[in-house]
Amino acid sequence: MTKNQQYKTEPLKCWQKAKEIRLNYYRDYALAHEKGGIRWSGGAWSFGAIPQGLGDDVYCITGEPYAASIAWNKKFALRCMEEVEKRGYARDLCSYMRNYWGSVLLDEYVFGGKFPKPDFIWQDHICCSHAKWYQVVKDIEPDVPMFCIDVAVGPYNIVNDNKLDYLVGQMLDGIEWLEKITGRKYDDEKLIEAVYNECRSTAVWAEICVLNKNIPAPLDEKTMYSLYVLGTLMKHSKIVADFYEELRDEVKYRVENQIAAVGNERCRLMSDTQPPWGFLKIFRYLEKFGALSVGSLYTFGLIGMWEVKEDGTWGPRTTPQQKGIEIKSREQALRILADWNLSKPEWQHFYSPHIKSEMMIRIAKEWHLNGVMLHYNRGCEGLTVGIAENRLALLEAGFPVMTFEGNMGDEREFDEARTVARIDAFMETLGFDKLE
């Protein structure tokens, strides 16, 4: 027991398994060709369930989490950034994108060896950078074919059959393209299985996040970063869906037995957008005040799928399996996949900051927060757009807000001492002194 500790704490029992899944993912991608398999590259939001119809030996690398891994490795990240800047690309572009480009240009894999070249690029486009990201990759490697799906049809509350038809039509074209460029026959049963797994994994992740409404919170956001990321790698995988169910059961056990992420919890916060990956220790600094971040719209909604429940609270979206829906055809699977993804919380606020503000205020209320930390993240235009309006809305709703400037992937734009000083001042305004 540490000073001022009032709750039990213990490590997650499934922590090592999470590390192994992530390690195997990057290793399997690198070694795919040695096993006679194929590999593709695309974003964490790409429709990864679709290429699975090509076979069980299809491996992917999703750009954003790979670039975050680079950001954590500060020396390599700096080399990537400098290489990209030497080639004339602007420093104010997405820092994930620049890290990824730098790794390709240097021909170095952050996990060792040369960068494993993909056989094709499979991407979708909602953020301003998504398609452009991989167009540049294709310029570097001109013989890598690329297919991109436009998903920007508006927020989910205005989605109709025409908008779904627009997405499904592109998906069907994409399957024909995949067959043509790989020479493989497409298997609809493997697609259907992948769609079921994606719905299951993303709904269960939301269920895990709901458990953090408990006081004390069973998970802190720094820990959650290492857990949600599995869904950004391969949310369509049975491995991830099964792991999330195992994790949910363990987190339920922690709630039932009052096992806390932070033993001296007395202040609950949330953050926003990607953190400065090279400086995650600021989340541990909060614990000196008995404070933790219970999550964020980013952590909850980047892959988690949500709906408003009968009691008016936010909860995991009901899956097709839970509704008793049996998927029997390619078109039905694609339509469910399109509808499922269009409801993604983090897609909604690309259209209006007011939508994001409503979701953030909901989290602040339902997760019993004392305040909010907003990262003015220069590294991601897509998730940071409208953040000043979000701040005003949160303040108007009665929630104290602290802002700090930084960059998720470029350590040169994060001032650690200044951020710590802002945390000190913010905690003082909330009425919390250091416990040590």
Image (cartoon, rainbow, N blue to C red):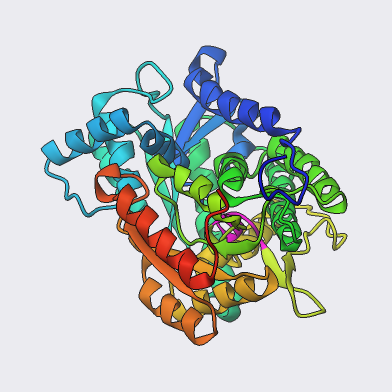
Question: Left or right of 231: which side holds 143?
Answer: left
Image quarter where the N terminus lies is top right
Quarter location, residue 385? bottom left
Counting labels gives: 0
The magenta span reads: 299-305
Is 60 in the magenta? no
Residue 171 visible somewhere in the drawing: yes
Examine the rendered structure and indicate whether residue 300 appears above or below residue 107: below
Q: Where is residue 184 in the image (x, y as percent from the top left)?
A: 56, 30
**Could you say which is closer to the camera, residue 159 or residue 316?**
316
Place of residue 378 in the rendered image (x, y in percent of width and height, measured from the top left): 30, 58
Q: Can I make out residue 380 in this image?
A: no
Q: In this view, does 137 lie to the left or right of 49?
A: left
Residue located at (69% from left, 57% from top): 209
Q: Which residue is drawn at 53% across and 37% down?
A: 179
Q: Is residue 241 above or below residue 400?
A: above
- Compared to residue 131, the image places residue 189 above or below, namely above
Q: Quadrant of residue 10?
A: top right
The residue depicted at 54 percent of the width and 72 percent of the height is: 163
Measuring from the top left, give residue 102's x and y in whole percent: 26, 34
Q: Seen in the image, is 68 located left or right of residue 341?
A: left
Relative depth, front residue between 211 and 419: 419
Q: Between residues 130 and 433, which one lies in front from this camera angle?
A: 433
Residue, far top: 34
Q: Taking 132 as reference, is 21 left or right?
A: right
x and y percentages locating residue 36 in the rendered image: 55, 16
